[in-house]
Amino acid sequence: MTGTLARADVVSAASPKRRRRAPGWLAVVPLLAFIAVAFGVPALAMLNGAFTVKDQATGATSYSTANMTASLDGAYLTALAGSVKLSAVCAFLGALLGLPLAQAVVSSRSRALREAVLTASGVLANFGGVPLAFAFVATLGNAGVLTRRLGLGEKGWNLYSFGGLVLVYLYFLIPLMVLTITPALEGLRTQWREAARNNGATGVQYWRHVALPVLAPSLLGGLVLLFGSAFAAYATAAAMVGSSVPLVTLQIADAISGNVLVGQENVALALSLDMVLVAGAVMAVYLPLQRRSARWLDA
Amino acid sequence: MARRVNTWRWPVLGLAALYFLVPLAASVVFTVDVPGRGVTFDAYRRIVSTEGFTSSLLLSLELALATIAVVLLLMVPAVVALRLGAPRLRPVVEVVCSLPLVVPPIAFVAGISTVLKWGPEHLSRTPLFQTFVAVQNPDFPFVLVLAYVVMALPFVYRALDAGLRAIDVRTLAEAARSCGAAWPQALLRAVLPNLRGALLNASFLTLALVLGEFTVAQLLGFTPFAVWIYSIGGSQAQLSVAVSVLSLLVTWALLLTLAGFGGRTKTASRG
């Protein structure tokens, strides 16, 4: 009697557990299967193609690092370096200009202004691609409104250049920086500033020895996030400059569309792999930094 | 101190306003002030009747709806289950859902186009070939939905995760189960209504992503809305800027609605 009771107890204790666990597993499986097919297969195809070389004469394929070497040479290297340079300049300027803007908003007592600027930043940070390029072409392009009114064309202004791209990219990078850095700026306690002032520190000293060290992880995090955004951007550049500025995204696009020497198709995949490695390095820097700044600011 | 702050604040805000408003204002001027013809709203009137406008916009909307449906069907049961029954899988799913952030869209599409080439090269006699053809049907390129779902995963995961953190799923689900609801019923009737904000958030972000997406669609040779705007840019400058201005306004309206629903910070999750 006691034996059956005990067994009944065990069964009733175990069965809800089993019932709960079964759907748990099953519900995650479709998601993982989907990612494996829709993301994993193209990723593996890219990896495989980047290291595959096809012999034009015999049609035989073999594994080699020739594509990777080619992707770091000549015009491809120029494009890769162009992208890195553009992204670095944009990230640096974006952080430099975004910080005072965010500080102006945070130090303001007007709630309406803060809400307005932060909402606008959220919207602008998501604004990119073809419409952004066309808006700038209409403003500062060859026949743009400002170009004509101010006679910029005679003064040597050219939107379809490295400088032009920087100007356009900052349009979504500065708002991104404002969004990234605002929580950190809000986390700076007024007590720290007061304590610094009571100890005789000037405003500059406060920023140098207190505020900036606390902000450093967030600033650096914002910097790499901006770099990654600019590095991956394609649509804006494609719609604006075509191929007059060498960028790795434009090179890959050319190769996919077939505008490339025969036998060089897989170099596009090698270039893609280069991009993934750069973007991966950026994320590897960004995520720990984000965690570290969160530790400071949540305390 | 406070007065010193004020002296630099307004110039900073003023310059920012100038930089962000001038291109918008200039775009509008560009579309209505045509050299030699004076002020005219002709560019806006011509939009609807222009070849490809309706079809590309419809295609984008269909793709967006399909993407939202697929991504929610995959993600909602999974994230709820991660909370309830399989917490050990959580770090795995978190990492896997963030992976698309590391692969720029252009690299992703390079991989996809390689896979699509396998169809004609290796699989032409197998039933799989028919699948390859079907997913590339120009009337409804399902391959784009697959790509967009992958690209939306990081944002949707974060939106849903934030929504779930705000409610006690376990108690909700167990209460529903104790009242005799089956699992699908508990999910649909008890958990989902409490996630309404997060679901809307995720849907709006996905909608904005799909409507503006250009890279993947263009390189795979399809013409949704963003690619169409690009394609008319060469021949009809006024018209293309007019459409850009309008599509901006629509996207902004969408994202502002989202900001109203879900708090501003979530719109920042671009990556």
Image (spheres, coloured by chain):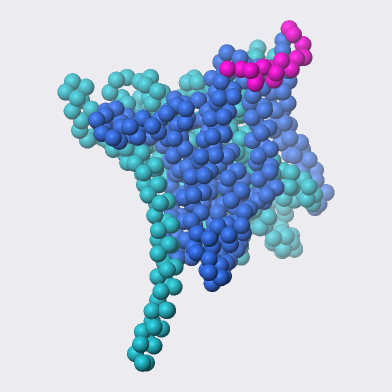
| Residue A100 falls within the magenta-colored stretch | no
Quarter holding the N terminus of chain A is bottom left
Q: Which region of the structure is painted magenta?
A: B36-51
Q: Position of residue A81 (x, y in %)?
A: 43, 31
Residue shown at 20% from the left, 33% from the top = A62
B42 or A19: which is nearer to us? A19
Q: Position of residue A291 (x, y in %)?
A: 52, 57
A228 or B151: which is nearer to us? B151
Q: Seen in the image, is A25 located left or right of residue A63?
A: right
Using the rendered image of the protein, determine whether residue A137 is visible from the camera's viewpoint: no
A12, above or below B180, in the image: below
Q: Quadrant of residue B195?
A: bottom right
A33, above or below A158, in the image: below
Residue shown at 61% from the left, 39% from the top = A125
Q: Position of residue A212 (x, y in %)?
A: 62, 52
A104 or A127: which is nearer to us? A127
Q: Quadrant of residue A78?
A: top left
Farthest residue, direction bottom: A1
Total number of numbered labels?
Answer: 0
Q: Position of residue A276 (x, y in %)?
A: 40, 40
| Residue B40 falls within the magenta-colored stretch | yes
Residue shown at 67% from the left, 28% from the top = B246
Name chain B's colour: blue
Name chain A's colour: cyan
